[in-house]
Image (tube, grey):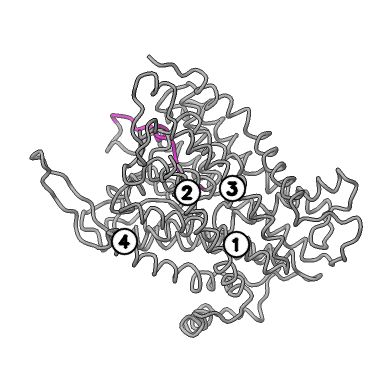
Amino acid sequence: MPQGWLQIAVFLVVLIALIKPVGIYMARVFTNRRVFLTPVVGPIERLTFKVLRVRPEAEGQDWKAYARSVIVFSLFSWLALYLILRTQAAHPFNPEGFHSGPWDLSFNTASSFVTNTNWQYYGGETTLTYFSQMAGLTVQNFASAGVGIVVVIALIRGITARSGRELGNFWQDLIRTLLYILVPISIIGALFLVSQGVIQNIGGYSMIHTLTGGTQVLAQGPVASQEVIKELGTNGGGFFNVNSAFPFENSSGLTNFFEMLLILVIPASLTYTYGRMVGSQRQGWAIFSAMFTLFIVGVIVVYMAEQHGTVAQHAAGLHTHAFNGSTGGNMEGKDQRFGVAGTSLWAAITTVTSCGAVNGALESLTGLGQAVPFSNLSLSEVVFGGVGTGLYSMLLYVLLAVFIGGLMVGRTPEYLGKKIQAREIKLVSLGVLVTPLAVLLASGLASATRAGTRSIYAGINPQGFSETLYAYLSQANNNGSALAGYTGFIQPNAPGNVGAYGISFADLLGGAVMIGARFLPILFVLGVAGALAEKRVSPAGLGTMRTDNPTFVILLIGVVILVGALTFFPALLLGPVVQSLTTRLF
């Protein structure tokens, strides 16, 4: 166990050490200041502006124009990806001769990758051509991550604006995000992964002979280039069906450590970027402190639960030797290369962010360990969250905490010199509640309708409800991880065994949830940014509540937990809690 705690501690130290340099770099990029990549990337940036006929200096956008650009770009991205998925038979780089899947699966997949969710109702190595993986999914991993980042930058500009209306230019922000941040890190990261054994090729699959005399097909493909942006952009969809548990995606303990860093480095560093852009680093550290506190509690709980194992395992003598040599660890669903610590830490990271990538089976966690992913998703992507989405979601809670705190102590609700009034609170409330509403409505439909219950493999019981609730928690939070069991129902006699009734329900409802829970909050966030941009800044007075001290951090954490508990606790009681209380050892 000490070695496991040491592994977690080293990871946290490295993460914290990266926050300042990465945060400063991103702040310079988004304030259009020169960085070390400017001599190389600058000419490409100017050429891209010229081709797209974008004049960022002369074409500032208010929140409505910025929102239209986000929607138009995302709609175009969805149509392009859907077209790619529907034309697989005509693709180049298709050595296995894959054809397109059913239309409803293509709808779900396009919706999933455009919304940064990467929920997968398919096995990548048995379904998609290399062209779909590269020109379709990998491109959208970059694009959807870029959209999340630019939205939070627009919100920051709204907070810092001095009685103006412009939030910047979406096209400039997106291009700079891609050229200066996501692409350079991805190139370096992909080269590192290849050096460590992650594959990158476009050859056909290999037939190998096993030690027992059998044969096995070994899938190939351009994996490293997708793997790095899958983690860096908190996308999560794997090239292979078993995701980052497969050695071709995640080859060793070192790549496991590196990929976990990729998932968290941008969401965590954006808090420092925020402090730089608003002119008060204490504000950024306050938000980071709230996120980090909630994150570290989850890490401790899941690791202790998995290290100890379950009562049933101990009673049956099934407790195993953990990776660090101590007894009692739950190694079910885990890879020996990563051990209890590496898998537990990954489970916490992937569910506090919108990543959803996995290096072990979430459904194989202990009851208490499995409560951590449920709890993380129930907090609606505010504990680091996705790239951009985590910070703008937390900033909504910051404004809500300012309003509640101001009312409680009789002080004027204001944030960084701007009064928080009815219009802003209405938009904040809508932005905070739209995701829980989508989860609860979808889970109810899936549990109470004939079409929905066909997708529940475990049947109508606490386990089945847990699988259903987690599926829509994951999709609404644009996460993408899943508990095994919730899937589309395939009728045995359906032509080609695809496109059956249950699959259409799960695909269409899931796609609608992912789209709604992604873009409605973005619209409300940009609405808040527009409202704040128009306000004048007032100097702080005796009635101003500080938002950069430990007291406010505690208040912020309390508001986040309270909202999460009020929205999801009754549903959690019906599924995971009941299941854990009724578990018996037979």
At 66% from the left and 72% from the top, the residue drawn is 168
Task: Give the mark nearest the N terminus, 2 or 1.
Answer: 2
Q: Secondary structure at mark 1?
A: helix
Q: Residue 35 placed where, x, y %?
A: 55, 79
The secondary structure type at the circle numbered 3 is loop
Name which of mark 4 and mark 2 comes first in the sequence: 2
Q: Quadrant of the N terminus?
A: top left
Q: Residue type at mark 4?
A: Phe
Magenta stretch holds residue 268: no
Disc 4 versus disc 1: distance between alpha carbons? 33 Å
The residue carrying pointer 1 sits among few (fewer than 14), some (14 to 19) or many (20 or more) residues within 10 Å by Cα, namely: many
Side (left or right) of 414 relative to 581: right
Asked if residue 297 is positioned above or below residue 49 in the image, the reply reads above
Q: Kindly identify which residue carries mark 2.
A: 8
Q: Amino acid at mark 2?
A: Ile
Q: CA distance from mark 2 to mark 1?
A: 22 Å
Report which residue position mark 3 lands on. 381
Amino acid under disc 1: Leu
